[in-house]
Amino acid sequence: MIEVFKTNVKGQDEAAWLVNLINSVFESYMVNFDLEDCDRIMRIKCDEAAIDSDSVIALLSYSGFTAEILEDNLA
């Protein structure tokens, strides 16, 4: 499963710190950021289970960042 989030993460240092934080809480998640995208995308992939989006959003919020699920707009 893959979940895509819109974030307010601005720099590579913040992104790297968040990747480490998320991986310390959710060991099976593979996390990457696309900060060049206008939505400052964070992608999380997990082959083992469904992604707990609410917990990821809460973890980022607790850390001072915002994240929201980016909905597919496929027509």
Image (spheres, rainbow, N blue to C red):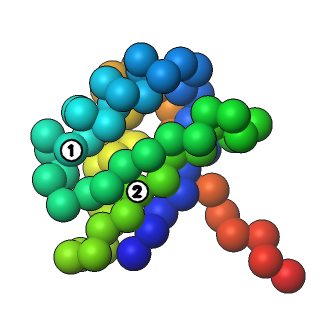
Q: Say left or right for 23 vs 65.
A: left
Looking at the rendered image, the quarter that the C terminus falls into is: bottom right
Q: For residue 44, which numbered disc appears in the image?
A: 2
Tell me the element at label 1. Answer: helix
Rendered image quadrant of residue 1: bottom left
Identify which residue is drawn at 14% across, 53% down: 27
Q: Position of residue 66 (x, y in %)?
A: 51, 32
| Residue occupying the point 30% across, 68% down | 46
Which residue is nearer to you in this view: 2 or 62?
Answer: 2
Q: Is residue 39 left or right of residue 15?
A: right
62 or 24, which is in the foreground? 24
Q: Is residue 58 above or below residue 31?
A: above
Quick check: can you spot residue 54? no
Q: Residue furthest bottom?
A: 75
Report the residue at 15% width, 44% height from top.
25
Question: Measured from the top left, where is residue 62 in percent x and y?
Answer: 32, 26
Q: Quadrant of residue 35?
A: top right
Q: Position of residue 17 (x, y in %)?
A: 31, 24
- For residue 23, the mark is 1
Query: Percent from the top left, x then y, of residue 47?
Result: 28, 75
User: Mark 2: which amino acid?
Assistant: Ile
